Amino acid sequence: MALLPFPPFSPELNCMENVWHYLRENTLYALVWDSYDAIVEACVVAWHFLINDPDRIRSNGTCEWARVSV
């Protein structure tokens, strides 16, 4: 086995990018906030929406190339 470094900008190789994309598309889209606190609150609500369903995290945060076969 050999570890290979990621290129400097490679969101398609970072599984967490799928999670952020999901949040932007499903909970944080087309919104305008009046204040910084409103932005933070919207992000907290979106995050709780995500973490309250482990299957949602599993389906969005899994990269096929990162699976280990035994």
Image (cartoon, rainbow, N blue to C red):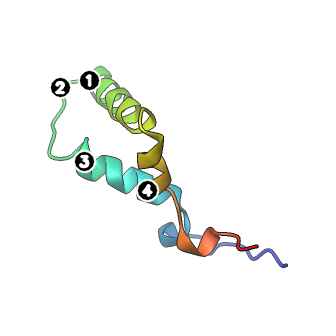
Amino acid, disc 4: Asn
Secondary structure, mark 3, is: helix
Residue 17 falls left or right of residue 40: right
The residue identified by callout 4 is: 60
Residue lying furthest right: 1
Location of mark 2 (residue): 34
Callout 4 secondary element: helix
Tell me which numbered mark, 3 or 4, is placed earlier along the sequence: 3
Q: Quick check: marks 1 and 2 in contact, CB under 8 Å?
A: yes
- Tag on residue 26? 3
40 relative to 69 in the view: left or right: left
The residue at the point 45 percent across, 47 percent down is 55
x and y percent of residue 39 in the render?
29, 30
In the rendered structure, which amino acid carries the disc numbered 2? Asp
Callout count: 4
Q: Residue at x 49, y 52 (%)?
A: 58
Q: Which mark is residue 51?
A: none
**Residue assigned mark 1:** 38
> Residue 21: x and y, percent?
35, 56
Q: Distance from label 1 to label 3 (Cα)?
A: 18 Å
